[in-house]
Image: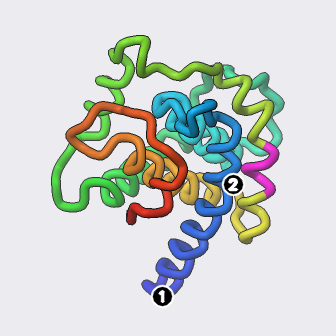
Amino acid sequence: MPLSDLREKLKKGRIAAAEFIPILWAKFITPDGSVHAGTILSAAGWLTGTSLYRAFHPKDDIPPGTVIQSNEVNKEWESLIYLFEEYNFGNVRVLVGRLIMSALAASDEHKPRVEMSYVQQDLQAQYNTVMKKHGFDYLEGARAGVVICSLLFNITAPLPKILIPVSLPELWRREL
């Protein structure tokens, strides 16, 4: 893919992310105007992962929250993790796998406060609609999902901080 096409897709991905983040934020905002970082990051990750899975298995009718195995998904997941690393850490070699494992061992305070099935049921159709509006198929939607996850990660968990809630206005003051 020519570099100009790649830049255009990234630009479109950022536009789609900017459109979807307020939808996601509105779903999980607390009365004080913040969101729980573990919840919103997990929700974005689940939506991204479902889009990735659908890229390779569009006809599967599996219940939300089902654990699946797919070699195609696993291979593409590695490239999405690489994108996440590049967006967030650049030349700093932070092993995302270690971050993920750390998150799994996090205290209950940092774990998502909703179930994956809830997120998929309430937000997956909206996510897919936004991605299609910007001309993305499921795979490109998963890549745009990495942009969403990256923006949210930078908003809610700038290193070396632990995941913390932030207010919506801070969302638009930070650059990826």
- Give the vertical position of 52 relative to 111 (above or below): below
* Residue 72 locus on image (x, y percent): 55, 44
| Residue 135 percent across, percent down from the top left | 73, 70
Are there few (<14), some (14-19), or many (20+) residues within 10 Å of tag 2? many
Is residue 43 in sight in this rendering? yes
Check disc 2 and report its element: helix, strand or loop. helix
**Residues drawn in magenta:** 125-129
Please tell me the numbered disc located at residue 138.
2
Q: Earlier in the sequence, mark 1 or mark 2?
A: 1
Res 75 seen here: no
Q: Is residue 84 above or below residue 118?
A: below
Q: Quadrant of residue 132?
A: bottom right
**Foreground residue, 3 or 12?**
12
Q: Residue at x 51, y 72 (%)?
A: 10
In whole angstroms, how far apart are the C-alphas of marks 1 and 2? 21 Å
In the rendered image, which quarter is residue 29 located in?
Answer: top right
Does the segment drawn in magenta span residue 126? yes
